[in-house]
Image (cartoon, helix red, strand yellow):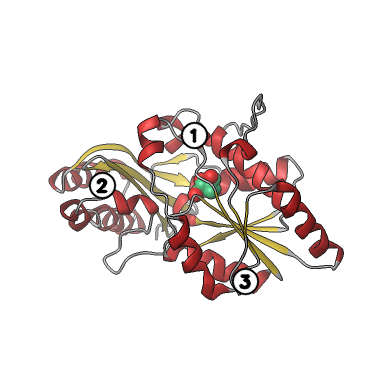
Amino acid sequence: MIAPILRDLATLREMTGTWHRAGETIGVVPTMGALHDGHLSLVAEAKKRATRVIVTIFVNPKQFNSPEDLANYPRTEEADARKLDRFDIDAIWAPESDTMYPPGFCTGVSVSGLTDVLCGAHRPGHFDGVATVVTKLFTQTAADLAFFGEKDFQQLQVVRRLSRDLDLGVEVVGCPTIREIDGLAMSSRNLLLSDRARVKAPRLNEVMEDIARGLAAGKPMADLTPRALRALENADFLSVDYLELRSCDTLALLETASEPARLFAAAHLAGVRLIDNIDVPVAR
Ligand code: PAF
């Protein structure tokens, strides 16, 4: 079935109300479009766990730090709808900007603590924008379950927190990062890489896997980071926003893998900011 593309909130509400009255569960996959296999793996998981599935497509202006980044973000709605055909989803929610943020809109959602570090420290206001739109998407779609990729692990933790703190009643399901065959984490931003930069991009994940091996053998970050930074510089990653080991739960900074941890990185390659994170086993 070809899913209807909805832009009107009243129509969406009528649909979700009917489903809930019939005892169905609604699974939502929030996206900004430019769908790749990472997104599609979330849709497949949603189809397994919910009786109705809505994919949202909205390029959220509030989470971009620069007008240029917002303007350059890929918009591929027709192709996205075609990619969703084979999943037999129930609706695509793709509101216009002034449906999401009508004139006079002045409410924001802000999650403190978890957002002070990593991307939050480098992209002021980004997570307020994410938290605000995700809260709206959850209430607009009357979601019971929502599916997010671990690729944006900090975002996943922020969304889990806000769903609990605001009693939204949405179960937030984290799904593993999907990678290209060469290890590059799938991301809509990969479309912005030149052919030359695309060849170098997997180096980020390789360097992280090297660090993770060192950490698993009990070495501290201080011993592993200088070599990793040199390797990234050699691969033309000209500025590294962060390369840090953090606790999975609290995102507190760690020096060794003494508890369940993840290694996080964000770096710029030929004008494109790439992020990645990997699980690090507790050191032997
Ligand atoms: O991960 C994304 O694509 C976005 O941050 C999200 C969750 C759809 C909110 O705009």
Question: What is the number of the mark on residue 112?
Answer: none
Compare residues 142 and 158 and report the one nearer the observer: 142
Q: Residue 85: horizontal and vertical position, in percent? A: 53, 71
- Secondary structure under tag 1 reads helix
Q: Can residue 229 be seen in this view?
A: yes
Q: Mark 3 points at which residue?
A: 47
Question: What is the number of the mark on residue 224?
Answer: 2
- Badge 1 residue CB within 8 Å of ligand 1: no
- Secondary structure under tag 2 reads helix
Indicate which disc, 2 or 1, sits on the residue closer to the N terminus. Answer: 1
Q: Residue 98: horizontal and vertical position, in percent? A: 60, 36
Residue at 43% across, 51% down: 262
Give the quadrant of residue 45: bottom right
Residue at 35% across, 45% down: 265
Give the quadrant of residue 182: bottom left
Residue most extreme to the left: 234
Q: Identity of the amino acid at label 1?
A: His
Indicate which disc, 1 or 3, sits on the residue closer to the N terminus. Answer: 3
Q: Mark 1 points at which residue?
A: 126
Indicate which disc, 3 or 2, sits on the residue closer to the N terminus. Answer: 3
